[in-house]
Image (tube, grey):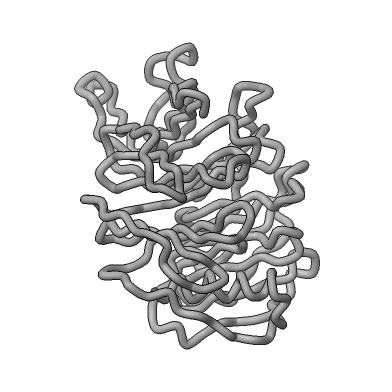
Amino acid sequence: MKKLQIMRYLLLLLVFQISLFSQNAIEFTGYKGNVNSVAFSPDSRYMLSGDEKGNLILWDISSAQKIHSLQTRENITSVNFSPAEKNLALYTTYGGDVTIIKASTREILKTLNKNGNVYYAEFSPDGKQLAIAYTREPTEKEETKGIRLNFIVDLHETSKFEKTKTLRLSKPHDPDGELFGSNFFETYRYNSFSCAFSSNSLYLASGSMGKNIAIYSFDLKTFAPTYKGHSSRVMFVAFSPDGNYLASASKDETAKIWNVSSGGSIVTLKGHTGNVNSVAFSPDSRYLATASNDETIKIWDVKTSALLKTISSLNGEMITVKFS
């Protein structure tokens, strides 16, 4: 519930042009557990949310009323809409399922099982690809190589949702960073929690337990130079809508804004006193919101890196934040 208050605040900020220095909020209630993820529909009329008890709820934004709900058996770890089709959405579960649905009717179009723990899934901005971030245990063959496959990103096309590529992010102790050869796996040396497409759908960023950020280029069909700078685990990554910036949230209690063209860190945003769990750009790329375990949301000016607002008194750790 607390996370949804924050989502609603940001919606008011952008749609109704409420001042940055206001802290108005509307509660969306009816949950039995922590809300792990929310997503706005492309037209900003609806909001989808999922909680740890498996409750998936579609909300009408203007009335703050529940349209319908779906009870699943597993902890829902992420929800997202397709930017290219307002009625196409997904939810992921810790038990390993990625379910594609028609949001308005709850009709299940496809279920993908990853035989592991799925943390996050996202449609590309052009709607043609789906990225799924998950962990799984190593096979016997992998164990003999001393490899722990803690984190994998699978890519699927969205016409039939067939898998097109597997990006394996392995532990740093992997001696050569590659297990079966480049024709079988595209390989990177760290494991991660989240992934994000660039606005032109040409790059995929992945946050990393190894403190770094992996960038995969679809044009080059390989990983670009690594973004380095955090001193602890990268929890979440997000590209700005204008394509100029990448933001990262870290367990080191900071967020960073990176220059996409150069790969360099522009600024480190300090001020939180707990893990920074999530970052989100406003649609015009002017503002960045950060969510933290310190029970606050902070809103920053992207160009000046000035802290514009701290939203506090939220009575709970902030897991995720989204702009409409």
| Residue 310 percent coordinates (x, y) | 60, 82
* Residue 37 visible in the snapshot: no
Q: Quadrant of residue 50?
A: bottom left
**Which residue is at 31% across, 54% downward?**
70
* Quadrant occupied by the C terminus: bottom right
**Which residue is at 46% across, 23% downward?**
160
Q: Quadrant of residue 52?
A: bottom left
Whether residue 159 is situated above or below residue 259 in the rendered picture = above
Residue at the right extreme?
303
| Residue 66 percent coordinates (x, y) | 41, 67
In the shown orientation, is residue 210 left or right of residue 107?
Answer: right
* Quadrant occupied by the N terminus: bottom left
Q: Quadrant of residue 115?
A: top left
**Which residue is at 47% across, 28% downward?**
167
In the shown orientation, is residue 191 left or right of residue 243?
Answer: left
| Residue 163 percent coordinates (x, y) | 44, 23
Whether residue 168 is situated above or below residue 270 in the rendered picture = above
* Residue 290 visible in the snapshot: yes
| Residue 36 percent coordinates (x, y) | 38, 61
**Which residue is at 39% across, 34% downward?**
109
**How many marks can you see?**
0
In the shown orientation, is residue 116 left or right of residue 285?
Answer: left
Q: Nearer the viewer, residue 15 or 60?
A: 60
Q: Nearer the viewer, residue 217 or 187?
A: 217
